[in-house]
Image (spheres, rainbow, N blue to C red):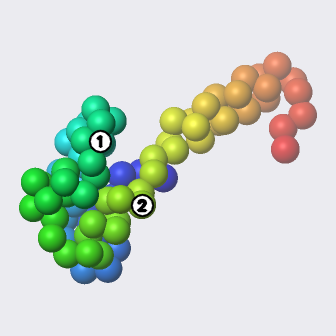
Amino acid sequence: MLPPVRCFTCGAPLGHLWDEYQRRVKQGEEPGKVLDSLGVKRYCCRRTLLTSITYIEDVARYYTLRAKRYRSGGVVG
Ligand SMILES: [Zn+2]
């Protein structure tokens, strides 16, 4: 849901790399090469960054719609 702060396996800090990793991958760089250049060597840390997805914006949109429906008197599930 949120960007990983630390590797789930070894606990190495990764949060400071997330923005640059995402930016460079979105610009078209190969994820493996980005991780190499950021100095992420352990496969557990690479896995954590490679497989993380952020969907907080999607969840926040749901809560906004839910609150809007609640205020208008609609049924909220
Ligand atoms: Zn790790």
Q: Where is residue 19 in the image (x, y as percent from the top left)?
A: 25, 42
Q: Is residue 67 left or right of residue 16?
A: right
Q: Examine the image and state in which quarter residue 62 appears.
A: top right
Q: Is residue 59 above or below residue 66?
A: below
Is 2 placed above or below 46 here? Answer: above
Quarter of the figure with residue 29: top left
Report helix, strand or loop for mark 1: helix
Return the mark for residue 51. 2
Asked if 46 appears above or below 57 in the picture, the reply is: below
Nearest to N terminus: mark 1 or mark 2 = 1
Residue at mark 2: C-beta within 8 A of ligand 1: no
Secondary structure under tag 2 reads helix
Q: In this view, does 9 lie to the left or right of 20?
A: right
Front-most of residues 6 and 45: 45
Task: State the image coordinates of residue 77 (x, y, percent, origin top left).
Answer: 84, 44
Residue type highlighted by circle 2: Thr
Residue at label 1? Answer: 25
Q: Which residue lies furthest to the bottom in this view?
A: 10
- Give the residue type at disc 1: Val
Q: Residue at x 45, y 47 (%)?
A: 54
Residue 65 vertical position relative to residue 4 in the rendered view, above or below:
above
